[in-house]
Amino acid sequence: MSSVQTQTYNPAEDFVWCKSMLPKVSRTFALVISVLTGEKYKSILLAYLLCRIADTIEDNVFLPAEKKYQILEDFISSLKSGQPADSISHAFSEHKTDDPDSDLTFQADRVIRVFYTLPLETRDCIVPWVEEMVRGMKKFQAFSTPSETITAVKSVEELEEYCYFVAGTVGIMLTRLFIRFSQTISMENQEKMNRLAVSFGVGLQLTNILKDFNEDLRRGWCYLPADLLQKHGISPEEIKNHPDDKRVAAIVEDLRQIAHSHLKNALDYTFAIPRLERQIRLFCLWPLHMANQTLAAITRKSGLFSGGTVKISRKQVKQTVFRTQFDWFSNNRQLLLFNSYPFQSLV
């Protein structure tokens, strides 16, 4: 029996703490997951927090790369064994801040302890994909290493590979959990969901990258691929200084079309979920529609081309949540909603 399992602690208290941390690190995911109940809620909440911890370790600017990846290896070992992740708390104690992500990561052991209250079959749906995410983090370590110059991904293919590691893996993990929780998903639809799972995650991640690329540029990262920059004859530094350049709009338009294609796949993925599975359907529909609305909100007049970001209004979020709660079961109505947001060409 692991030391985590033999320690004296209050699992109910730790789980309450985990739930309290979620809206602090992501209000959006806190909204989306609120539709789930029971083991679905608990498992996906913990899976998200574990991914968030891995991401926070990777993004830490104080740790050298070698130290960072040793800590990530220790983290994965803890997930597999249930042993305390002492190296994480030690590393983060030196530079601990009031930032919620920092606090979550400093107390990673609390998440791992609650994680070990889940059935083995559920944990086995999660651990391999957190490990795969960490493997990708090692490959793309340049994007978490401070640099005096702006580092850009090399190509659209590399950008999609990056999105696979940070979000496609989550799509696969969630699919494994959905299939475990539901007894009504046919083998044919399971195959369809498995085939489209990565695309779902990539579509959401590409949308986030597009709406936040100005902020990333200020941190020294450029997720607008170098091959597209070369095609349009512009550098990351020029984009940072002149976001209103028409060449920037052309690049964003290229990537928006790719993201929209992935979101269409995500809609097909959701249609493979049985109509009886209201919770899982809504869990997928809310971020999908919000991402699609975000892409549609990218216009030449949006803040994206003045150095800011683009986001949908709280009113749109509330309308999406309200409407889908009444017609989650109708593929036709969800398709109509998806297609109801007009895309203005940027070029």
Image: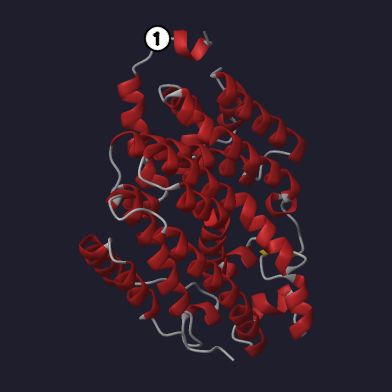
Instruction: Please state the horizontal and vertical placement of residue 2, each as a whole percent of the image.
Output: 53, 11
Of 33 and 300, the residue lying toward us:
33
How is the structure coloured here? secondary structure
Of 41 and 30, the residue lying toward us:
41
Instruction: Please state the horizontal and vertical placement of residue 49, each as a whole percent of the image.
Output: 46, 39
Of 296 and 221, the residue lying toward us:
296
Query: In the rendered image of this protein, does residue 150 appear above or below residue 43?
Result: below
Residue 44 can be seen in this image: yes
User: Is 189 displayed left or right of 87 in the figure?
Assistant: left
Query: In the rendered image of this protein, does residue 155 appear above or below residue 40?
Result: below
User: Is 198 displayed left or right of 278 in the figure?
Assistant: right
Q: How many numbered circles does the render carry?
A: 1
Instruction: Please state the horizontal and vertical placement of residue 97, each as a whole percent of the image.
Output: 50, 39
- Give the quarter of the figure containing the C terminus: bottom right
User: Is 158 displayed left or right of 180 in the figure?
Assistant: right
Picture quarter containing residue 177?
Answer: top left
Q: Residue at x 28, y 40 (%)?
A: 37
Q: Residue at x 46, y 42 (%)?
A: 48
Q: Residue at x 36, y 40 (%)?
A: 183
Return the residue at label 1: 8
Residue 220 can be seen in this image: no
Residue type at mark 1 is: Thr
Of 171 and 72, the residue lying toward us:
171
Q: Find numbered disc 1 in the image and state the secondary structure of the residue it sits on.
A: loop
Query: In the rendered image of this protein, does residue 248 appear above or below residue 198?
Result: below
